[in-house]
Image (tube, rainbow, N blue to C red):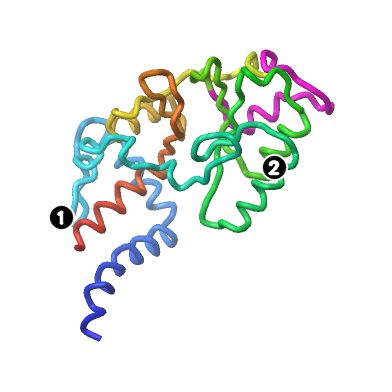
């Protein structure tokens, strides 16, 4: 039994934190807001003398969190991306997700080398795969993004074909993004300033890479700190 004690000791803190977050969700929300403001102002947050969240956020590049690596490789795309394809491709993706419950696809990639898109399939891709974001890409470079709900709301009610140029002219397409070398602290501050919960990460050559989500970023930072201090 004593051989199991180190392992149990490592697991105790993550479990306790998870239970606390579940039971005291509203209180944690208030602490989260205060924490974000503190980190944004350049300060640090110390919890029980164990770790400093602000210091970790400052010293961690957003690309090091690898938040996109939890996604499976979409049809013809990079990790977590779906390039709009045929209905048979959609069926394959649905099957893959059913067989991989711990993996997700979060982004629909709309590219200019596809001239026309099926309105019905666009809606079906987003609704059945649970996609959260739509990224527009021209000449293999990032050309803006929308939340999937905003995207679907602007699609015509009719079935049929819609050209890329019409999709690219939708209202509310955002060019806001961050760079992979930015610190997690600066990325969180950017989200706070823009009043958004997610922001795309775009490389220096205009290549879209993945989406950074505020809750996921904080969860990765806290998890890594807790586990590091319990080794």
Q: Choose top left, top right, bottom left or bottom right for residue 2.
A: bottom left
Helix, strand or loop under label 1: loop
Give the residue at mark 1: 49
Crowdedness near tag 2: few (<14), some (14–19) or many (≥20) residues, C-alpha within 10 Å: many
Quadrant assignment for the N terminus: bottom left
- Identify which residue is drawn at 66% across, 53% down: 95
Give the residue at mark 2: 90
- Identify which residue is drawn at 15% across, 55% down: 49
Left or right: 61 in relation to 217: left
Nearest the eye: 167 or 36: 167
Q: Choose top left, top right, bottom left or bottom right for residue 4.
A: bottom left
- Identify which residue is drawn at 66% across, 31% down: 84
**What distance separates the C-alpha of mark 2 from that of mark 1?**
49 Å
Q: Is residue 165 magenta?
A: yes
Query: Is 98 above or below relative to 134?
Result: below
Name the N-terminal-most of marks 2 and 1. Answer: 1
| Badge 2 vs badge 1, beta-carbon distance below 8 Å | no
Crowdedness near tag 1: few (<14), some (14–19) or many (≥20) residues, C-alpha within 10 Å: few
In the image, the segment drawn in magenta is 145-166
Query: Is 38 above or below relative to 72?
Result: above
Q: Position of residue 7 (x, y in %)?
A: 26, 72
Query: Is 54 above or below relative to 97?
Result: above
Quadrant assignment for the C terminus: bottom left
């Amino acid at each position: 039994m004593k051989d199991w004690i180190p392992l149990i000791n490592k697991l105790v803190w993550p479990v306790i934190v998870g239970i606390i977050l579940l039971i005291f969700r509203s209180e944690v929300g208030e602490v989260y807001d205060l924490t974000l403001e503190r980190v944004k102002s350049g300060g640090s947050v110390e919890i029980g003398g164990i770790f400093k969240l602000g210091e970790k956020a400052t010293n961690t590049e957003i690309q090091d969190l690898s938040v996109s690596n939890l996604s499976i490789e979409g049809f013809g795309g990079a990790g977590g991306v779906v390039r709009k394809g045929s209905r048979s491709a959609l069926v394959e993706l649905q099957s893959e997700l059913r067989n991989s419950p711990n993996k997700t696809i979060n982004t629909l990639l709309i590219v200019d080398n596809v001239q026309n898109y099926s309105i019905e399939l666009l809606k079906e891709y987003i609704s059945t795969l649970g996609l959260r974001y739509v990224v527009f890409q021209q000449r293999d470079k990032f050309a803006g993004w929308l939340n999937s709900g905003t995207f679907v709301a602007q699609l015509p009610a009719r079935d049929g074909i819609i050209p890329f140029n019409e999709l690219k002219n939708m209202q509310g397409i955002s060019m806001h993004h961050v760079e992979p070398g930015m610190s997690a602290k600066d990325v969180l501050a950017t989200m706070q300033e823009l009043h958004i919960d997610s922001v795309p990460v775009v490389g220096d050559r205009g290549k879209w890479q993945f989406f950074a989500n505020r809750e996921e970023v904080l969860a990765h930072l806290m998890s890594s700190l807790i586990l590091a201090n319990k080794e």
